[in-house]
Image (spheres, rainbow, N blue to C red):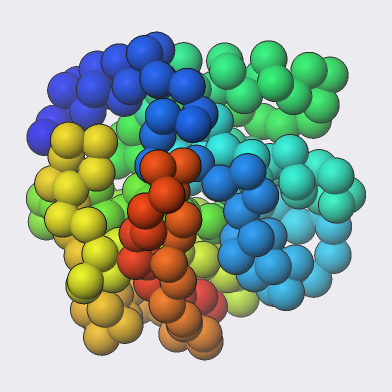
Amino acid sequence: MDATVRKSHWENIYSTKSLNEVSWHEPKPDNSIKLIEKYAIDKNVTIIDIGGGDSFLADNLIALGFSNITVLDISETAIEKAKIRLGENANKIKWIISDITSFEPTEKYDIWHDRAVFHFLTDVLDQEKYKELLTKSLNENGTFIIGTFAIDGPTKCSGITVQQYDIESITKQFSRLKLVENFNFQHPTPFNTFQKFIFAVFKK
C-alpha cells in the first residue's frame, strides 16, 4: 500500500468511526505509560508518539508532567479529534501530520514510541525507511518502545494485512539497537475480544 492510499484509508477510518468502534482504543495505555516513565530520565525528555493521532497517551503524559511531547499521525482527522478532546492542553503538544515513511524530523528524540504502526509496514522498502529514520532521529542512549501484533495475533487490522512478530524477528528488524526488555500482552478491544501483542524496548 503506497502512502497516498494509506492516508486515504486512515482519513476514512477516523472520519467514520468513534473511539469505541476501533479495536486499538485504550482508555488508559498503561504499558506505554509505564515504559515511558521507566526510561525517561526526567520530565523534559523529548518524546515522539508515532501514529498517536487520537490515542490517549498524550493526555496521560501531560497529566504526569511531561513537557516535550510530539504526536505524529498520517490522519489529520485523528489529530483534530485529539486536539478537540484535549482543549487548552493541545497547545502543549507538537502535532505533525505525516506518513512515517516520508517524515522529515527537525529535532532528535530521547524516546520514540510506536504502538501499532510498524506492523502495518509490510513492504521491505517502507520498513527500511522507518528503521533509517528511527536510527537517525533517536538521540544517543535514546529509547525505542514498540508494540506490534504477536505471531499468534491478528493477521489484519482495519482491513489491512499486517506483519506479525515474535521477539526474535522484531530484534532482527532493529538489530542496529540493543534490546533491553520485552513482554507479551493481550489487548482487550472495545468488542470484548483480545489481540495478542509483543512489546519491546531498545536502546541506541
* Residue 58 location (% of width, % of height): 68, 41
* Residue 158 location (% of width, % of height): 25, 36
Horizontal side, residue 162 vs residue 108: left or right: left
Return the residue found at the far front: 192
User: Is any atom of residue 135 visible in this view?
Assistant: no
Horizontal side, residue 63 vs residue 110: left or right: right
* Residue 34 location (% of width, % of height): 69, 67
Horizontal side, residue 21 vs residue 151: left or right: right
Residue at the location (49% across, 31% down)?
A: 20
Q: Quadrant of residue 142?
A: bottom right
Q: Quadrant of residue 41?
A: bottom right
Q: Is residue 67 above or below residue 155?
A: above
Q: Is residue 181 above or below residue 9?
A: below
Residue at the location (30% across, 62% down)?
A: 149
Q: Is residue 107 above or below residue 76?
A: below
User: Is any atom of residue 122 visible in this view?
Assistant: yes
The residue closer to the viewer here, 86 or 173, is 86
The residue closer to the viewer here, 62 or 96, is 62
* Residue 181 location (% of width, % of height): 51, 85
Q: Is residue 149 above or below residue 177?
A: above
State the count of labels.
0
Residue at the location (42% across, 77% down)?
A: 184
